[in-house]
Image: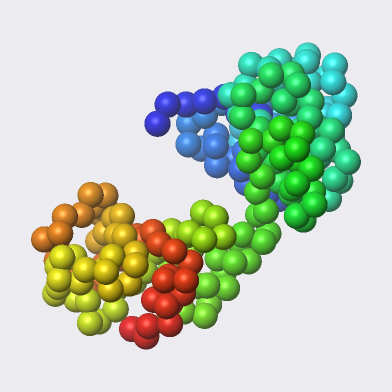
Amino acid sequence: MSSKQYVVIGLGRFGTSVAKTLYALGNDVLAIDQSEDNVQSISDSVTHAVQADATDENALRALGIRNFDVAVIAIGVDIQSSIMITLLAKELGVKYVIAKAQNELHAKVLYRIGADRVVFPERDMGVRVAHNLVSSNILDYIELSPDYSIVEIAVISQWVGKTLKELNMRANYGINVMAIKRGSEINISPSAEDIINDGDILVVIGGTEELNKIEKVKT
Ligand code: ADP
């Protein structure tokens, strides 16, 4: 993974977590917030932390925003600022702008003004936690679109000792196995002859409907 230059604007809970993680993964991160307290508390965990009002175009220019590969606009509550800053980031030439939205209408506006990706952290986490709670074998759940998801499944007892070919997941369940996690190892190109062990975790991709069926299978 090559390191990139990220600017994170808005250091609430989401922005702070994104900025710290990007930095911990070896990237350059400029973190911006209008609150001096938020800037202070993140300053040791990112490359640079700056106090500024990001709706001020000149301030963004002075910070060299256009040189960043990715801007994360992590402002949810103040929708007006979120929209203005997303627009400015695009206009100033940031290649990829990800913005956090509070609701569907907010998301629609963000896409209209040029956001490359819109995320709903609270909603997405809510969906993941709910799937996790209702099913003992679903460990993690990432919605790719309303129709497709990637899911981590703890293997169910009737799969143990069988090969992927024997299980024929695609025909029987309508899902594809992308990887098998075994302890700290992960096999990212499982072959048809790989045998499922007890305790394995399968990373599968599939249609939401098919995955929902698996979710109901009891271990
Ligand atoms: P979360 O729900 O992730 O905590 P919030 O929307 O509550 O997110 O937090 C947004 C953050 O963005 C706050 O820390 C706020 O100070 C900051 N912020 C809001 N408007 C601006 C702005 N115009 N310029 C810079 N930072 C801003």
144 or 2, which is in the foreground?
144
The location of residue 8, given as percent across then percent down, is 68, 34
How is colour applied across the structure in the image? rainbow
Q: Farthest front residue?
A: 171
Instruction: Tell me if residue 30 comes above or below residue 215 in the rendering.
Output: above
Q: Where residue 122 sits in the image (x, y, percent)? A: 68, 59
Image quadrant in which you'd find residue 165: bottom left
Left or right side of 137 for 195: left
Q: Is residue 184 above or below residue 2?
A: below
Q: Residue at x 22, y 76 (%)?
A: 159
Q: Quadrant of the C terminus?
A: bottom left
Q: In this orientation, which residue lies closer to the viewer: 107 or 85?
A: 107
Q: Is residue 47 visible?
A: no
**Image-quadrant location for residue 139:** bottom left
Q: Is residue 191 visible?
A: yes
Drawn side of residue 125 relative to residue 168, left or right: right
Taking depth in this image into account, of 170 and 110 the one nearest to the observer is: 170
Name which residue lies at 71% across and 40% down. Answer: 111
Rendering coords of residue 54 (x, y %): 82, 29
Question: Picture coordinates of residue 99 (x, y %)?
Answer: 70, 41
Q: What is the number of callouts on the image?
A: 0
| Left or right: 163, with 81 as reference point | left
Residue drawn at x 55%, y 42% as measured from the top left: 21
> For the N terminus, which image quadrant?
top left
> Measuring 46% from the left and 79% from the top, which residue is drawn there?
135
